[in-house]
Structure formats: C-alpha cells, structure tokens
Amino acid sequence: METYYKPEDLGKFATMGEFAPDLWEKFMSYYSAVFESGALTKREKALIALAVAHAVQCPYCIDAYTQSCLENGANEEQMTEAVHVACALRGGAALVHGVQMKNVAKGLSF
Amino acid sequence: MSEIIKNFESMIDNPDYKFTHGKLRIIQVNVGKLCNLSCKHCHVDAGPNRTEIMTRETMQHILRVLPNFETLDITGGAPEMNKNFCWLVDEAVKTGIHVIVRSNLVILHEKEYINIPEFLADRHVEIVASLPYYSENDCDKQRGSGTFKKIISMLKKLNSLGYGIDEKLILNLVYNPGGAFLPPNQDELEQQYKTRLMSDYGISFTHLFALTNNPLGRFENFLKRTNNYDKYMRKLYDSFNPAALENMMCRFQLSVGWDGQLYDCDFNQVLNLTINGVQNISELYEIHKRKIKFANHCYACTAGSGSSCGGATA
C-alpha cells in the first residue's frame, strides 16, 4: 500500500454496509436528514461540516465538503473563514490545556 | 470515464418528452457573438473579436413569426452591440409580445449604450442580468476585472428606473457556478443574494435564476485544460433527475442563431445541431411539433433541480 488515503476510496464508502446493512441504512438515513435545510440552511451546514472536516483532518471529508460548500452557494472567502474557525478551536483547545500544565506545575513547585 | 455515461436520449422514458410541446412559448434569438467581455463559463465563446452578427433582414423574418410565441428572448454575445438591437426591440414591443433582453450590464456603461436602460424601461422590457456571485472577487474571477463594480452601479441605476421594484419592470439575475461544480438550490441562493445585495448595496431584484454551466465552448476548454471534463460529465450524469425532463427548455422554444439557422437551444447552436425540419428562419412559415436533437451536453439541463435559461425546472 503506497498510501493510506486514495481519492477513489471515497466512492467505496458504501461497502461499509456489507456485513452490517441495518446499521449502514440507519446511519445513512440519519446522515441525509442532518444535512437537509432546517433551522440552518444547507450552505451553513456544509460550512460547519467543512470546518469539522479540518478539525478531524479527514481528507475524504475535506474533498467532499469543499465541493458541497461550492454547490450550496458558499465561496472561498466563507470557506476560508470556516477553516479558521476550526483552526481557532483546535489551537484554543491546545492553549486552554495550558491551564492544566500550570495547575500541575504549581502543585509541584515551591 | 465518459464511455460509461449512457446516451442522453436513452434516459428519456416518456416518448412525449423527446418532442417539443404542442405550443411553443419562447423564441430565443442570438443576435451575435460579439461581446465586450470574455467570460470563463461562456459556451458561445463570445468576445470582442467575434464578427458573427445578425442582420436586419434576418430580424425581419423573426418579427414575421413572432405571433406564434409569447416571449422573445434576445441574447448574444452582448445583444446591445448589434447595431439593429434597438430596432428589433422596438418592433417586437409594438406587436405586444413579452420581450426579454439578456445583458451583462457592463456594456451599458459605454457611451454608445448609455441610454439603453431608459429605452428598455420605457418599453417594459424584462432584463435578465448576469451576476455570478454577490462578492467582487468571485464575480471578477469569472467575468473579468472590474466587472462587479460596474454591474453593481448599473443595478442601482436600474433600481432607480423602477427595475426590480415596479412589478412591470422585471429584473432577474443569473447565477452560474464559478467552476466545475453544480449550482446550489435556487430558492436558498436567491434569499442569500437578496439579503446581501440589499444590506451591502441597497439593491432589489425580482428573481434569481441558478444555471448549470454547460460543458461546451470556453467552459469545455476550461474543463479539459484542468482535467475536470470527465469528472464534470460524471457529476452531471450521476445527478440526472428524470423529473427535469418534462420542462426542459427545448420543449417550449425555438432558438435562432445569428445567421437565421434554427436550433432546439442555444447549446445546440454551439454544436451546429440544427433542428429537424426547416433549417432557417427565412423559410419558416408554419411551426410544427418536432423531434428534439439531444446529445450528452443535455445532462447539464437535467442535473439536480434542472437548468434552463429561466432557471431551475424541477
């Protein structure tokens, strides 16, 4: 295996329904419902998904939700801001754990 | 990859949908390929160096057949650049037919065309204007540097004349994707456009049409140059929506090329696919139901919510 991630593997996602078709059906039904327009528009949901895709660093999701954002009327400016939200959350999450570091350090120091 | 895409016509289950509707509604006339812009998505490959322009003689034949239609839809190129444009509009309006002009709006800033907004308003001509997005960067990337500001200032002028405000002065905008992807849901995007254009610029308009880019002309070249052609065709094919077949625009219109040649649609013009039957407007005296000529670019009109010159169809 020359690489763990291949673009064509995204098209094989449905093979996860083999051996567990009921679970797959339930997941896909739920998944489709999540992205329908509701209190949030499809465009807003696609932008959230794009930010999460970057936070979880899933290349399949980044590929899929970049296209989804464009096809739901977002532009690169909005998509870049969404990625910055993910970046701020990941960076902020690391930084706020600095408080743990401080707590531990204080407990050990004079 | 494209060989596994089925022939478009084989996807049409209802044989009626392979023919035009009994009554045609629209005669769409391409008055020339000359344009002040060279937009990246343009299937006509229109631009400043094109010389194909409709003559007044051909326009006279169009006026002769107008009673068979409800709407005259004038397109190009930039239709205003045909020296007989105002004459055609004037003569058509006198017959009582509804007239649509597809304008890039940028042309209306040029001295020679500066009185056209008032001319169209006085005659209650519907304007369909291209605006690929509500932000400068996205618009200019597709239509050329500086176009967004000119479109916005012309939209303000059209609003001041009552366009997009007075119900008799229809001002529709057209979105088309800025690359190899499908358009968003038309209603949601219209809401987005209305909110942003009003809050950012105080602009009103009637409706937004979300169009799918057709893989022909300059856009086809882009797809091939960027290795996106097969993927895009696959996307159109995978998004085929049978519910869009009934209202495909070719079923309700006759398309006339700059030289009077007759087509099922503006896209077939690019491929030189003339209609079944009489080939030129000069020979057209009776309009019969006709078998439409399809090819695989027709998947652009049936993808997702469907696409036509009047927006979504399904």
Image: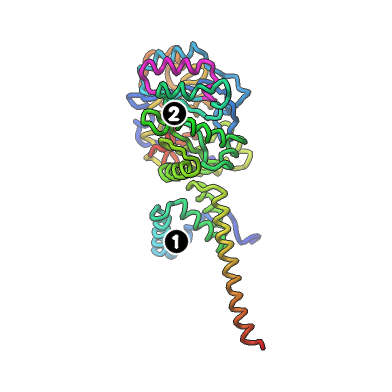
Q: Residue at horizontal 39%, vertical 62%?
A: A26
Instruction: State the quadrant of the N terminus of chain B.
Output: top right
Q: Residue at horizontal 64%, vertical 60%?
A: A3
The boundaries of the magenta stretch are B76-98
Q: Looking at the picture, how far across and down is residue B197, in whole percent?
A: 48, 41
Label 1 or label 2, whichever lies nearer to me, is 2
Does residue A91 show up magenta in the picture? Answer: no
Where is B95 relative to B16, above or below? above
Q: Looking at the picture, how far across and down is residue B205, in whole percent?
A: 43, 36
> Is A90 in front, or is B239?
A90
Three-letter code for the amino acid on which mark 1 is drawn: Gly
Label 1 sits on residue: A17
Q: Is residue B219 visible?
A: no
Q: Is residue B314 visible?
A: yes
Q: Residue at horizontal 36%, vertical 24%?
A: B24
Does residue B81 show up magenta in the picture? Answer: yes
Furthest toward the left, the residue is B22
Residue B15: image quadrant is: top left
> Is B6 in front, or is B245?
B245
Label 2 sits on residue: B161
Three-letter code for the amino acid on which mark 2 is drawn: Leu
